[in-house]
Structure formats: structure tokens, C-alpha cells
Amino acid sequence: MVDFGKVLIFIGITLIVVGLFIQFIGRLPGDIYIKKDNFTFYFPITTSIVLSIVLSLLLYLFSRFFR
């Protein structure tokens, strides 16, 4: 059985890493940004893909080390 304290520490570190990642990346090339007169549309497709890869890697490491 996994120790609950270790899981909470891992979740906290993951949230900090993801928060810093989002803060420093900002808008990547490939993100869709349309600004017209009275309308703004922003869809972070590239940021979503990069974030998905990073989270997948973190969850893989989590499942690998906390069996």
C-alpha cells in the first residue's frame, strides 16, 4: 500500500512544477490567437500538447516508483 504522505508530496510538487511551467512558457508558437474589433479568441493548442506530454511523463514516473 502506498503511503498517503508520499502521494500528497508528489501531488504538491507536481502542482508547483506545472504552475511554474505555465508561468514561464506563456504563448508558444502554434497557439491560436485571434483578436478582432470586439472579440478575442485564444486557444493554446501547442501549450496543451506540451503540458500533456509533461503530465504523462510525471504520471508514468509516479506509477513506476510508487507501486
Image (spheres, rainbow, N blue to C red):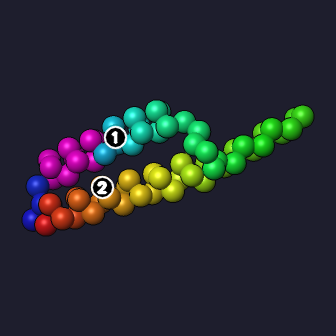
Q: Seen in the image, is 13 located left or right of residue 50?
A: left
Please check the rendered image and state whether residue 11 is part of the magenta-colored stretch, yes or no: yes
Task: Give yes or no for contact between labels 1 and 2 (Cβ–Cβ under 8 Å).
Answer: yes
The disc at residue 17 is 1
At a point 59% along the width and 39% down the height, the residue shown is 27
Give the Cα distance between marks 1 and 2: 10 Å
Give the mark nearer the N terminus: 1 vs 2.
1
Residue type at the position of mark 1: Val
The disc at residue 58 is 2
User: Taken as a whole, is the magenta stretch helix, strand or loop?
Assistant: helix
Farthest-out residue, front: 29
The image position of residue 65, as x and y in percent, is 14, 60
The image position of residue 44, as x and y in percent, is 61, 48
Farthest-out residue, right: 37
Q: Using the image as rendered, state which of residue 57 and residue 19 is in the foreground.
A: 57
Q: Quadrant of residue 19?
A: top left
Does 4 sit above or below residue 67? Answer: above
Residue bounds of the magenta highlight: 4-13
At a point 20% along the width and 52% down the height, the residue shown is 7
Helix, strand or loop at label 2? It is helix
Please check the rendered image and state whether residue 58 is part of the magenta-colored stretch, yes or no: no
